[in-house]
Amino acid sequence: MDLNAQGGAHAPVSACASGAEAIALGLDLIRAGRVDVVVAGGVEASVHALPLTAFAQMMALSTSNDAPETASRPFDKRRNGFVLGEGGALVVLERADHARARGSRAHGRLLGTGISSSASHITASDLPGQVRAMSQSLRDAGLSGTDVGVVHAHATSTPQGDVAEAQAIAQAVGTHPVVTATKSMTGHLLGASGALGAMAAILALRDGSVPPTRNLTEQDPEVALDVAAGSARSGQWQCALSNSFGFGGHNVSLVFGRA
């Protein structure tokens, strides 16, 4: 109502992939010619006894309570679960000619999306489903894995999930991109995490800087990727891929290009 947005209001419900799927849906609406501009993303406020207890019962939360500032450590050998966070992220998607006509500044381009359902297990990571989402997003963008310079990983800091995603990235994209996992800094924002990851990927291309993965002091030997750690990685990349994988087997990948 504040925006007087009349092209439809939609709320994807796909667990931790919801924010990313909202962005993918926004691209579909623009491509279909139904709208010129879409505001898409995710917001989550879940630091509450009930979800904390549920995730603890699932053994998904970190148990490093004595050092909470280092508890979220994606891809690290000593990771033991995620840290719950709260927040939100929104992007404005706009048809290119419409944006040019009003003199809008573009921060990046959404080139392709991929969505798959693992349909196998409520919590376990599914490597083939993740590979399908990434491969589909690259096909949709008309690109191959070799074109990707940066990957924003879903990487929640769980023992099984991080390794599965690392293997999926290596298979669908390759081991050459610079990989970052910003949940090491923000915690896991659940339904908002995909939108925040998309924003990190866009800014990495725009600013030529990939943020480091915090608390990564000893990379898991099963993670055969070039993960940025310690300090930001500088460079000029043309393409970035952002992953979001939700409980229940929801897999979403977004591919962005420089503006």
Image (cartoon, rainbow, N blue to C red):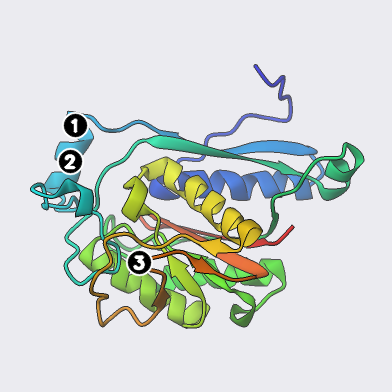
Specify the label residue 230 is tagged with: 3
Tell me if 14 is positioned left or right of 138 in this view: left
- Locate the N terminus and report the quarter of the image it occupies: top right
Circle 1 is placed at which residue position?
50
Tell me if 21 is positioned left or right of 14 in this view: right
Q: Circle 1 — which element?
A: helix
The reply to whether dot 1 and dot 2 touch (C-beta < 8 Å) is yes
- Give the foreground label among 1 and 3: 3
Amino acid type at image mark 3: Gly
Amino acid type at image mark 1: Leu
Amino acid type at image mark 2: Ala
Q: Estimate the x, y position of residue 114 in percent, counting from the top left.
A: 57, 62
Q: Circle 3 — which element?
A: loop
Name which quarter of the figure residue 103 lies in. top right
- Give the foreground label among 2 and 3: 3
Circle 2 is placed at which residue position?
54
Mark nearer the N terminus (1 vs 3): 1
Residue 69 visible? The answer is yes
Placement of 246 over or under 40, stated as above or below: below
